[in-house]
Image (tube, helix red, strand yellow):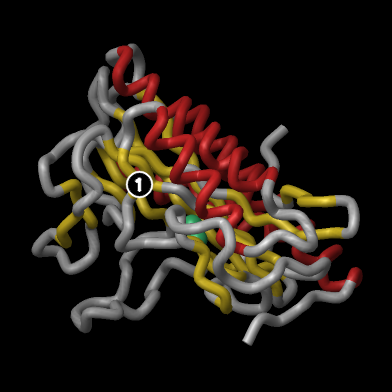
């Protein structure tokens, strides 16, 4: 069941989204060769406390069983797609890191992700990052009342594949509101004429994950980290948006 939000609820989601954006911006600026993913995690945790925000990834139950997620952020490096567990791994010049981050503030969730180059990176990595962010915006453009949800999915897939990248199938976006994950699932692939008709008041987390090589992924022995099957690079961008009469409003927009 898709839960439509009232204008008052969207105001609250805008505040949660703003906090997510502020903290991601801080993390983006901290990404440099020599920092560990645990360092980034600690910064995120501190910034949540300061703002009275509850980090929602921490202790998230593992759908495959096993230990709950230990981090405040997901930190996925190079061939890691999503759900990378923060660790003492030191980021090196030429790496790329995807940071996924979500909170609940005053009862409403915000969820957003960015991929950031570490120092100087190869042109292929920069291209992947650019196209993944552009694919997200291609999807967001279709988040208008009257379209079907599949229009978002299809726009992302078409753009990504036209640029020569593949779209991960095993993980998808989602509705968001009082909970981090609500109906409907928001795939990054598929036909434009499928799925529910979009309505004002729907709030979605749209989150394409693009790979240089195969779209296939596997889960690491830690029970969380998703890795590309062929170890090619992967990037991830996500925004929480609200569908309004005037089109999409990005609730997690960074300044
Ligand atoms: Mg996320
Ligand atoms: Mg999400």
Q: Position of residue 156 (x, y in %)?
A: 50, 44
Q: As drawn, which residue projects farthest toward the front?
A: 193
Give the secondary structure at mark 1. strand
Residue 32 or residue 176, whichever sits in front: 176
Which corner quadrant holds the C terminus? top right
Location of residue 66 with respect to 189 vertically, above or below: below
Query: Does any portion of residue 89 appear in the rendered image?
Result: no
Left or right of 210, for residue 67 = left
For residue 38, side relative to residue 177 (left or right): left
Instruction: Give the vertical position of 78 relative to 108 (above or below).
Output: above
Image height of 195 relative to 208, above or below:
below
In which quarter of the view is residue 160 placed? Answer: top left
- Residue 45 % position (x, y): 49, 56
Q: Which residue is mark 1?
A: 167
Spot the residue most to the bottom.
1
Q: Position of residue 180 (x, y in %)?
A: 56, 72
């Amino acid at each position: 069941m898709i839960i439509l939000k009232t204008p008052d609820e969207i105001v609250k989601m805008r505040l949660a989204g703003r906090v997510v954006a502020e903290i991601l911006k801080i993390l983006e600026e901290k990404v440099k060769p020599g920092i560990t993913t645990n360092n980034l995690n600690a910064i995120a945790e501190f910034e949540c406390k300061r703002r009275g925000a509850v980090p929602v990834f921490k202790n998230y139950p593992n759908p495959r069983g096993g230990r709950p997620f230990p981090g405040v952020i997901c930190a996925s490096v190079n061939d890691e797609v999503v759900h990378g567990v923060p660790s003492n791994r030191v980021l090196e010049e030429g790496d790329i890191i995807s940071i996924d981050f979500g909170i609940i503030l005053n009862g409403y969730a915000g969820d957003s992700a960015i991929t950031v180059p570490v120092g100087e990176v190869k042109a292929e990595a920069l291209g992947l990052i650019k196209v993944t962010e552009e694919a997200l915006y291609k999807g967001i453009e279709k988040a208008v009342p009257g379209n079907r949800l599949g229009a978002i999915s299809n726009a992302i897939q078409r753009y990504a594949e036209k640029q020569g990248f593949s779209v991960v199938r095993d993980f998808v976006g989602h509705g968001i509101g009082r909970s981090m994950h609500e109906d409907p699932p928001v795939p990054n692939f598929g036909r434009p004429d499928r799925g529910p008709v979009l309505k004002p008041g729907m709030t979605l987390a749209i989150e394409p994950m693009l790979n240089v090589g195969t779209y296939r992924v596997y889960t690491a022995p830690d029970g969380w980290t998703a890795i590309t099957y062929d170890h090619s690079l992967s990037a991830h961008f996500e925004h929480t948006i609200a569908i309004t009469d005037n089109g999409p409003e990005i609730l997690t927009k960074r300044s």
